[in-house]
Image (spheres, rainbow, N blue to C red):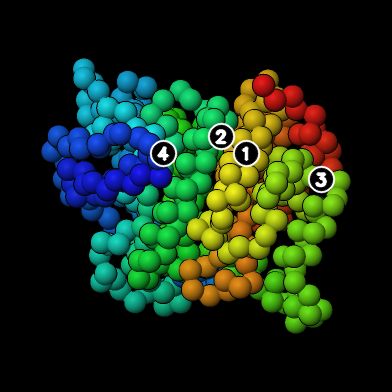
Amino acid sequence: MIRTSRRLADGREIVYYDADGSTASRDAVDPRDLPPVSTQSQLRWDALLGEWVVYAAHRQTRTFLPPADECPLCPTRPGRPPTEVPESDYQVVVFENRFPSLATAVEPDVPPAAPGAPYAQLRPGFGRCEVVVFTSEHDRAPADLDVARLRLLVDVWADRTAELSAIEGVEYVFPFENHGEEIGVTLSHPHGQVYGYSSLPPRAERVLASVRKHREATGGDLFAEVVAAERGGPRVVTVGEHWTAFVPAAARWPYELQLFPHRRVPDLPALADAERDSLAEVLKDCLGRFAHRFDEPMNYIAAWNQAPVRRGRDDWWLHLQLFSLRRAPGKLKYLAGSESGMGVFISDTSPEDVAARLREVELP
């Protein structure tokens, strides 16, 4: 993999990733006259739930579903306004978000607490938000990318995880993809994001607590026991040389897969080359099943669950959640009263049936 770092007109970093053997020089200059990026992000502590909430009001003006000829993720080409990517073509490119929820240059001075709420502690919205563009082709769905491109993408995720983990103050690195308007994407060009959080997200905290509680109660390894049971169970959808994808027994979403490596590793940088090869193949298979389960491709979220940067790493097992809100043709799963109000998911699908339906999908 060839990695080339440059700067955009407002000083943001942009990094081009090309497969070995590429002769691209990546010397194009951003011609735009851009104001400096300014963020007013804050974190507020919810004392009752014990969770941080991010406030980023400056994002209200970000680009929202522009026409294809105005897409900011397409390459910069003659006859069209310059985009976020100065080059006329690229393979995979990563750049700092122009409208970040979290930023390393955020205003550090904030009051100790929210007005009139002494328990709502405030913190600067420190972190880093990056955009990962999977291809220069605007209308190419992630499921249509070949295995070689997905393999390059795995290396990019691993590289960005290592880079963000090295930032002082970043405690958790989260690569993810939102796909489909129903999910809430604001740009239709195939892309994902990487967030560097200054604290552990609630999901990571809860998983670590469950692993430790299980060890204290039984002496066992909860991750290892779950993975072993699922790999031999009825919900397996596809198996690669080093990865298995299955519908979890307590799936929350109508269509949900978890992809686990057969060897315990804490995060993407820890994967060996053969494991990365296998991941690209299994991911291609799973994305294809989501794309062809119904007459129209399913919206989805792909969320990497990695070990925290500094603590709990020996307890963690890297895995990917791939889930959709689509429960049937023309029908979405909405997070209504029970889910949104109380956090209790009620599923309209059976994990065993979902696994069977996904196994039956005929891939092109």
**Looking at the image, residue 165 lies above or below residue 65:** below
Q: Give the residue at mark 3.
A: 235
Q: Residue at x 60, y 49 (%)?
A: 274
Q: Amino acid at mark 4?
A: Ala
Q: Residue at x 53, y 56 (%)?
A: 268
Residue at mark 2 to residue at mark 3: CA–CA distance: 24 Å
**Relative to the observer, which residue lies in front, 188 or 13?**
13
Q: Amino acid at mark 3?
A: Arg
Helix, strand or loop status at disc 4: loop
Q: Amino acid at mark 1?
A: Glu
Q: Where residue 133 sits: x, y (%)?
A: 40, 38
**Relative to the observer, which residue lies in front, 45 or 246?**
246
Q: Toward which corner of the image does residue 102 lie, by quadrant? A: bottom left
Q: Residue at x 30, y 62 (%)?
A: 104
Tell me which numbered mark, 2 or 4, is placed earlier along the sequence.
4
Disc 3: CA contacts within 10 A as few (<14), some (14-19) or many (>=20): many
Q: Is residue 356 left or right of residue 27?
A: right
Residue furthest front as drawn: 21
Looking at the rendered image, the disc whose residue lies closer to the viewer, 2 or 4, is: 4
Q: Give the residue at mark 4.
A: 19
| Residue 147, disc | 2
Q: Give the residue at mark 1.
A: 281
Q: Are dots 2 and 4 in contact, CB under 8 Å? A: no
Q: Is residue 204 left or right of residue 138?
A: right
Q: Amino acid at mark 2?
A: Val
Q: Are dots 2 and 1 in contact, CB under 8 Å? A: yes
Disc 1: CA contacts within 10 A as few (<14), some (14-19) or many (>=20): some
Looking at the rendered image, the disc whose residue lies closer to the viewer, 2 or 3, is: 2
Looking at the rendered image, the disc whose residue lies closer to the viewer, 3 or 1, is: 1
Residue at mark 3 to residue at mark 1: CA–CA distance: 19 Å
Tell me which numbered mark, 1 or 4, is placed earlier along the sequence.
4
